[in-house]
Amino acid sequence: MEDKLFSYVVKLTSSHRGAGTREEEEARKYIVEVLRSLGYDPRIEYFPTPPTFSYIL
């Protein structure tokens, strides 16, 4: 379980966008299942925005 969980976390954190592919969605669902089995209630309450850059004109 730990190896699969670790590989899924690595896959999602190395992605340059949100969990949009089928493989990324599978990873997200598995991580949520594991967290729920450990007694956590994983919810997304804050959606991070992509970094913005300030340019001095």
Image (cartoon, rainbow, N blue to C red):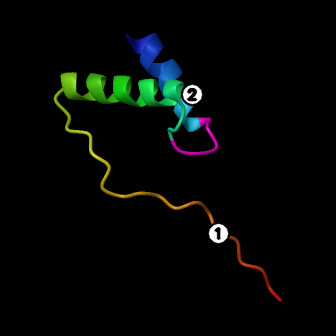
Indicate left or right for 57 with 52 as reference: right
What residue is pinned by disc 2?
11
Side (left or right) of 55 relative to 8: right
Looking at the image, is 40 positioned above or below residue 47? above
The secondary structure that most of the magenta stretch takes on is loop
Residue 14 in the image: x percent, y percent?
A: 62, 35
Residue at the far right in the pictured view: 57
Identify the secondary structure beneath mark 2. helix
Q: Residue at x 56, y 37 (%)?
A: 13
Residue designated by label 1: 52
Identity of the residue drawn at 41% across and 31% down: 28
* Amino acid bearing label 2: Lys
Residue 40 picture location, percent across and down: 20, 34
Dot 2: few (<14), some (14–19), or many (≥20) neighbours within 10 Å? some
Residue drawn at x 27%, y 28% as measured from the top left: 35
Nearer-N-terminus badge (2/1): 2
Regarding mark 1 in the picture, which secondary structure is present there? loop
Image quadrant holding the N terminus, namely top left
Give the magenta-colored segment's residue range: 14-18
For the residues labelled 2 and 1, the Cα–Cα distance comes to 24 Å
Residue 8 placement (x, y as % from top left): 49, 23
**Looking at the image, is 18 positioned above or below residue 12?**
below
